Amino acid sequence: MQVLGFKKIQDHKDSSIGKELDDCMTDWGITKFLTITVDNTTTNDGAIDWFKRNCIVKEDTILDNVFIHVRCYAHIINLIVNEGLKEVGESIIKVRKIVKYVMGLDKFKSIVEQLKIPHSSMLILDVPTRWNSTYTMLEVAQKYLRSFERMEVEDGALKYALLEDTMGRRGLGPPDTVDWENLEELLGLYDHLRESCESSVGLLNDMAIRMKFKYDKYWGDGEKINKLLLVVAILDSQYKLVIVEFCIRDVLGNDKAEQFIGVLEYDIDALYNHYNNNGGQS
């Protein structure tokens, strides 16, 4: 991977971001590009639209850059998971604060040793915008549950510190039994999410419904799917169009799938004609 530029953008207007992107391509003399991947935000949607209309390089574009916009799927997955995590948001905040408080304290290390708790995995703080780091923080913190409970008894300042946030306002306090039970159920999410949408009740069901709603917002109608990614699968001899059609019907349902597949076939024809007319004798 090569970093092409690291620039300060004066504001978050569509045109400002699009122009910086265009300037970067021009500075490097890049005249051919197929797709640009950005986080899934409204501002980036506008920036890509601006770039498509105003970019300096117009030669060698694929169908006038109609397929250029690829939404970052890692970002979308993070949004989906964080939507589900809202069901246990307060519990996560409590654990995050107590982990931050005890990290590096000799008193806590001493308690861990006294209780003979295996600690091959050290406590870590998460990056709240990265769901996988939150999961890891909770997974490790759960192993130290008895140490946290003992720390609350032996350190009188802990509860007071956690009852106030950084601005001196009233906080949520340390995690209680219900919080730890919520997080234990959350850690089983990988095994239960799919069936939870249909059959379960309770926390996982509520989380699954939230996450499915967010999923449908991005992929449920097919409008935000970059069809170029599907063309890649269609050209793979293992999959071809029949497998892609099957997956599309499974995700969108038959009615929406028919319309989507029709547009996809039109785009495939357009791509073929583009390369056929511009590829020369080879």
Image: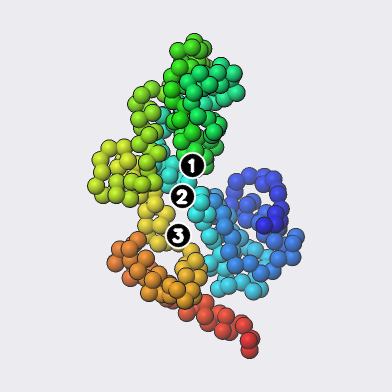
Q: How far across and down, in percent of the image, does residue 134 sit?
A: 49, 37
SS type, badge 1:
helix
Pointer 2 and pointer 3: residues touching (CB < 8 Å)? no
- Which secondary structure lies at badge 2? helix
Q: Residue at x 53, y 67 (%)?
A: 67
Disc 3: which residue: 224
Q: Nearer the viewer, mark 2 or mark 3?
A: 2
Whole-angstrom CA distance, mark 2 to mark 1, is 9 Å
Q: Is residue 184 visible?
A: yes
- Residue 109 lies, in percent from the top left, at 56, 21
Viewer-closest of 114 and 269 = 114
The image shows residue 74, relative to residue 229, as above or below, that is above
Q: Are marks 2 and 1 in contact (CB under 8 Å)?
A: yes
Q: Mark 1 points at which residue?
A: 131
| 111, 5: nearer the viewer | 111
Left-right relation of 49 to 4: left
Q: Earlier in the sequence, mark 2 or mark 3?
A: 2
Residue holding disc 2:
77
Q: Residue at x 33, y 46 (%)?
A: 192
Report the quarter where the C terminus lies.
Answer: bottom right
Q: Earlier in the sequence, mark 3 or mark 1?
A: 1
